[in-house]
Amino acid sequence: MPLRGGYLIGNVNPARMDFRWFLVGNCIAILSYLVTPAQATAIMDLVEERWEDLIGEMPLKVTYPALEGHEWRIVTGCGPKNTRWSYHNGGSWPACIKVGRPQIAKLAVELVEHRLSKDGWPEYYDGKTGRYVGKQARKYQTWSIAGYLVAKMMIENPSNLLIISLEEDKKIVKPSIARSASF
């Protein structure tokens, strides 16, 4: 983990903590105000700092690092869907707008917009190579089209964010969580 940035961990249970990056959880935490503005900024700092790992050729990785090998087989049952490093869709970019980083969303959308249309709005891309993954049946996926359209709407008019984002509740006292001084 770089010194600049941070994220919410993926999973906590009595047996272990899952320290991987989970895209959706972090973005929903930003949009729903479950993180402080400083924590939201740290999450976006991480995205910028680890651009090649989290964005790469086809943004945005669902988890990082991806499950591989034996662990992947146990968790997924070796299903051909949701292969490691899969790109799912670009519907997470409103979080960039909320944190005041529209340039991240713009760069990511520029990477994908021509490819998505040309490839028929597929469900999956290989996250490492950026190549289309799947069969004809996995094309024209509503969430891929919707994610792209929402991202474009937010970039063109950031006030649209109010449609899907919660505002801070000033009455709630949030715990003070600081980055470890051990770095």
Image: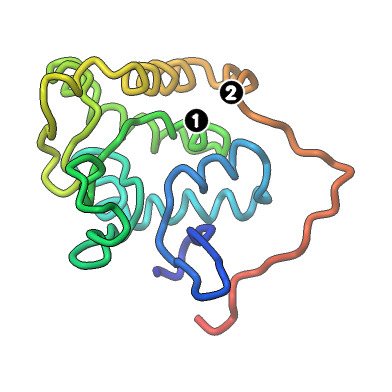
Q: Is residue 115 above or below residue 167?
A: above
Q: Is residue 129 left or right of residue 142?
A: left
Question: Which disc, if any, is residue 42?
Answer: none
Q: Is residue 72 above or below residue 183?
A: above
Q: Which residue is mark 1?
A: 94
* Residue occupying the point 37% across, 22% down: 143
Q: 24 or 42: nearer the eye?
A: 24
Q: Is residue 150 left or right of residue 168?
A: left
Whether label 1 touches label 2, CB < 8 Å:
yes
Q: Which amino acid, by three-letter code, is at mark 1?
A: Pro
Can you give x and y, in whole percent of width and height, for residue 55 in the image?
Answer: 28, 45
* Residue occupying the point 21% across, 67% down: 70
Q: Which of the 4 image quadrants contains residue 81?
A: top left
Tell me the distance, in whole angstroms, between the alpha carbons under discs 1 and 2: 7 Å
Q: Which amino acid, by three-letter code, is at mark 2?
A: Leu
| Mark 1 or 2, nearer chain start | 1
* Residue occupying the point 57% across, 73% down: 14
Residue closest to the far bottom: 182
Q: Is residue 170 left or right of residue 17?
A: right
Q: Which residue is mark 2?
A: 161
Quadrant where the image shows the N terminus: bottom left
Q: Is residue 138 left or right of residue 136?
A: right
Can you give x and y, in whole percent of width and height, for residue 177 in the image?
Answer: 69, 66
Q: 74 or 168: nearer the eye?
A: 74
* Residue occupying the point 42% across, 46% down: 23
Q: Is residue 138 above or below residue 64?
A: above
Query: Label 1: few (<14), some or many (≥20) within 10 Å?
Result: many
The mark total stands at 2
Can you give x and y, in whole percent of width and height, for residue 110 in the image?
Answer: 26, 27
Can you give x and y, in whole percent of width and height, for residue 166 in the image?
Answer: 69, 31
